[in-house]
Amino acid sequence: MKEIEKAYEAVKYEDAIYKKWEKSGAFKAKINKSKEPFVISMPPPNATGTLHLGHATMLALEDIMIRHKRMQGIPSLWLPGTDHAAIATQSVVEKKLQEKGIKNPRADLGRKKLLSEIKEFVKDSKDTIRNQIRKMGASCDWEKEKYTLDDDLNHAVNTFFGRLYKDGLIYQGDRIVNWDPNMQTTVADDELEYKEEKAKFYYFKYGPVVIGTARPETKFSDKVIVVNPKDKRYKHLHGKEFDVEWINGKIHAKVIADPSVDPAMGTGSMTITPSHSLVDFELAGKYKLEKEQIIDFHGNLLPVAGEFSGMHIAEAREKIVAKLKKKGLLVKIEENYMHNIAVNYRGKGVVEPQIMKQWFVDVNKKVIDWKGKKSSIKEVMQDVIRSGMVKIVPKKFDKIYFSYVDNLRDWCLSRQIWWGHQIPIWYKISEEDKKIWKKHSESSSYLLQSLGIKILDTRFGDKEPKNGVWIRDPDTLDTWFSSALWTFSTLGWPKHTVDFKYFHPTSVLETGYDIIFFWVAKMILASTYCLRSDGLPEEKCIPFKTVYLHGLIRDINGQKMSKSKPETCIDPLDMIAKYGTDAVRLSLIVGNTPGNDMRLYEEKIAGYRNFVNKIWNASRFALLNIADADIDTSEIHKKAKSRADKWILTNLNRLIKEVDKDINNYRFSDAATKIYDFAWLKYCDWYLETTKGEHINPPVLLYVLKEILKLLHPFTPFVTEAIWSHLNSENMLINEAWPIANAKLNFAKESGEMEMVHEIITTIRSVRSEKKVPPSQKIDAVIYAGVWTKTLEDKKEPIIRMGRLNTLSIHTEGPKINNAVWKYVGGMDLYLPVENLVDIEKEKEHLLKALKITGDKIATIKTKLSNKNFLEKAPKDVVEKEKKAFADLEEELRILNGKISEIKAISKK
RNA sequence: GGAGUUAUAGCUCAGUUGGCUAGAGCGCAGCAUUGACAUUGCUGAGGUCGGAGGUUCGACUCCUCCUAACUCCACCA
């Protein structure tokens, strides 16, 4: 025992402990059909990413839940995995290839080669994130690890797609999509970011009206003017048609009135460009107008632009304006027009709305047999939350969820990149078209469109259909399409494996609130649809029973941490190296309440490192003071001797109850804080300090320490396991049984703090009156403290070790130290020095202040107690409490008055 | 434009269905320290719970309005 270091150095222990856990099989979930399991599917981090604070928080929270349940003997599965993060990964690899000199990786390498490049890259970097998950101490079942592009998960994806297709829920449609000309792919609405930008706003004469626009380059073939029907300025024009002079000659235009136009915006009249604006596209659909593409997929103008054809839009804009000016059609230019432009949040490319053929999921068609009624995807998604089948913690996110689902649009599934699950759709084409197609390296679906390839037939399938020439849709599926299946595809679905039957639905989904739309909603969509069509009862079709949404971690200024601001950005791995995983975990848990953001700063982590060290030292102390670590701690209630023993056991018992309640209610911060307080303030500062010396009761000392370690283990797994190995060489703490509150350990009556306090105060008072000394200013502190003294064998002078105060000592015999007179005060075997007087004036001031406060309180409480309404309407226990408080206060007042008269008597002398 | 969240000590945050004198950590000031621990111990200062109303015997807690900050959604032709 003696060789334990004075300070706990996390780095020395953590990796070895993790290996030991993993090797022992402690993380493996064991099926036990007589018990209901506890299951978490780990939100899969990007396979090529590195651990950030969001991951660290997620891992810490989930590990707490899993370790707690595991110690309770509940079969617990935490299934880890990684995500292929399609767009992010492909763009990283493409960039790397470009750095190597391959200018256009897709065209130059072709699909097969590029994919194998990406595969290599993922393979190499996957271990990074895996090891970082281990660094956090995550006790997940690595044997069940999955990757969203695994073959069996691909099979699940295709099965999901196939069923939707068969049910007519998947359709291909011309839709306006967010096209990123840089990345050459569509971007989901969810993935857009808006950036404010200053631009010029142009006014042009267009026939009888003046129109305003920021984008003249899209206006070549505008032939429809739209005005608000209530706008009096344009009433005479409704339904009229006429020829107007425009960029490249005359255009036959007509006027439509629609309420979507804002009369206050610009001139109140506009022309529409259905191909490159969502609003215009919807208007065109409403009035059945033609939609002509103006800009191609690289951002260049098409032949409709005449002399500007082939020019990039950025370059063309001013030239078009110049031409219109020459024609006398330019009215004015507003220079400082602020507007938002949409950019892809990955890569930041400016998005150009385009009409393209894309695959969509219909969320409104009623095909799901749900609770005896044909329902749409949207309706099922609403019902699952509304009926409470899935609970969201905190509840405020219900509203946010509904505002999203109620306005849910059809889900655009296709992405024009190669890394991901390729769409399992085949097109029958002619031999000749196939030759053309091959020349273009099977690029992307928009080329199918623009090359004019004729599709003769369309089929769903994993493999190429027979008879005829078939090509597969070159696009891939939205990453979230595979993530949506995560809770059950990882358990073997579409097969109903033993694991699937036992472990699904999962218990808790724990993640940041920022991906509630991306992921949480899509998981509900996918699991209810897939599993219901398997014929499972509704309650088995949800992906999880509870969603716990943690707050996001922000920097000290409340800003999002981003790599662009390294000075405020905290890297969890650096912090782990510096302060240890346990400290990092605590700093992420304490103060983190569901759905509320939390600021993190290094001092906070350092604070928890100090706590970890405190536990280490308390244990060290215990071990140094116990001859034999194998002390029998059974039947501990019979071994509690002193009042202090009983007090700490009673408090421990209370703590266990509260911690269980808190963890079950997802109040992890509260649970951690309570254990922290108990361990540091009650066990170390109070119990250890009080019993130090000859009053150590080894069984209780050890028992309480062990219980603290168990309670703390889910929060700080490493240090607790490290200490445990000194206490118990046979079993690892990770496998120990979780503490259970024991009624026998409730000594509240014998050991209640207040009772003890009163007893000691009484004794002290009697001591004082005997010796006629003024009350010590620090007397009250005595109650919490307890100090010991010890004579060193090798020193002549008696030594007083002052743990907390100068005023108290514990000794079996009335000591005579430093010429002080010590008096036995009983109760806890305390000896009190009756000299060491204090500053009388200060004491007087202090007492008078206390007297005033107490007097005020008594007045308040008196009013309350004389209030009839209070006595009649307030709950009985509250009234009782008030009465007791009143009695206590009066007693306090008496004591204070006694002290004051004492002081006055002394100061007179 | 629509919706939501937050506002409590110098800083970061707790405060569970309204009910004992509103709490913690950090920071600050003072004191202490030879056998677990300076990654320590004790003591102290510091709050009209954003503002104004209302409901109630009683409001940090519930309701309304106002102010400020943040977030999400929509979107600017």
Image: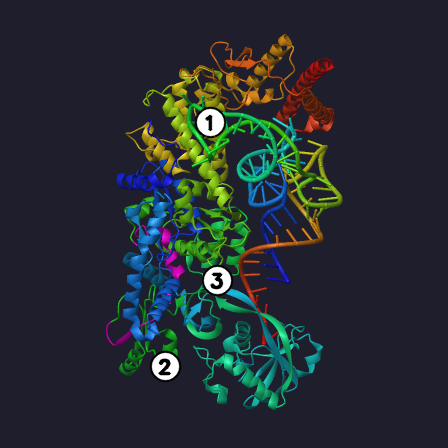
Whichever of callouts 1 and 3 sits on the residue coming sooner in the sequence is 3
Label 2 packing within 10 angstroms: few (<14), some (14-19), many (20+): few
**Pointer 1 with pointer 2, Cβ within 8 A:** no
User: In the rendered structure, does residue A486 fall within the stretch colored magenta?
Assistant: yes
Q: In the picture provided, is A473 more to the left or to the right than A645?
A: left
Instruction: Pick the quarter of the image with the C terminus of chain A.
Output: top right
Q: Residue furthest front?
A: A796
- Expressed as whole percent of the image width and height from the top left, the position of residue A889 reads 67, 21
Label 1 packing within 10 angstroms: few (<14), some (14-19), many (20+): many
- Distance of mark 1 from mark 2, alpha carbons? 77 Å
Numbered circles on residues, count: 3
Q: Which residue is mark 3?
A: A190
The residue segment tinted magenta is: A466-494
Badge 1 and badge 2 both on one subunit? yes
What chain does badge 1 belong to? A
Q: Amino acid at mark 1?
A: Cys
